[in-house]
Amino acid sequence: QFEIMSLFETDDLEAAINKTADMIPLMICTKSGDGVTIIGEGKRVDIPVDPITPVDATGAGDQFAAGFIYGMLTGRDLETCGRMGNMCAAEVISHIGPRPQADMKQQFLAAGLE
């Protein structure tokens, strides 16, 4: 979120999100503990995150991207992709180190996303 606001030299996150969405076909803005906003395919999806106490944020963005892209490549809708990304990021920040310790496909199954 801070990067996108810096890009447009504004403190207004919503304005920065909307400007970005006007320029590209798929806009994804992660907002740390405030969830993720996705705009694409003619709609906006705001996905909250479950509260978690982070242990180590290393790898959170990469893991979000991995979960989101996995969802896209397996034909999921944008909301499900965002939820998968959030789950991957939450898993990796719950322990020290940038790699997941849990089997994320099993986590997706347990959450009804697979």
Image (cartoon, rainbow, N blue to C red):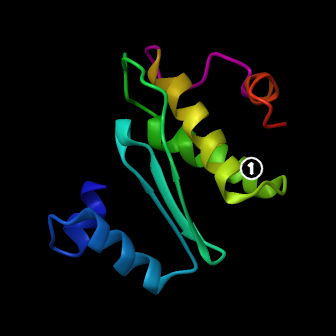
Q: Is residue 2 above or below residue 95?
A: below
- Residues rendered magenta in the picture: 95-104
For the point 38% across and 76% down, the residue is 18
Instruction: Measuring from the top left, give residue 57's x and y in whole percent.
Output: 37, 28
Instruction: Measuring from the top left, give residue 40's x and y in whole percent.
Output: 60, 72
Q: Amino acid at mark 1?
A: Gly
* Residue 93 horizontal side relative to residue 86, left or right: left
For the point 67% across and 17% down, the residue is 102
Quadrant placement of the N terminus: bottom left
Q: Tell me the SS state at disc 1.
A: helix
Q: Magenta residues: mostly which secondary structure?
A: loop
Instruction: Measuring from the top left, give residue 63's x and y in whole percent.
Output: 56, 38
Q: Is residue 44 above or below residue 72?
A: below
Question: Is 1 covered by the magenta stretch?
Answer: no
For the point 67% across and 58% down, the residue is 78
Q: Is residue 65 above or below residue 75?
A: above
For the point 78% across and 37% down, the residue is 113
Quadrant placement of the C terminus: top right
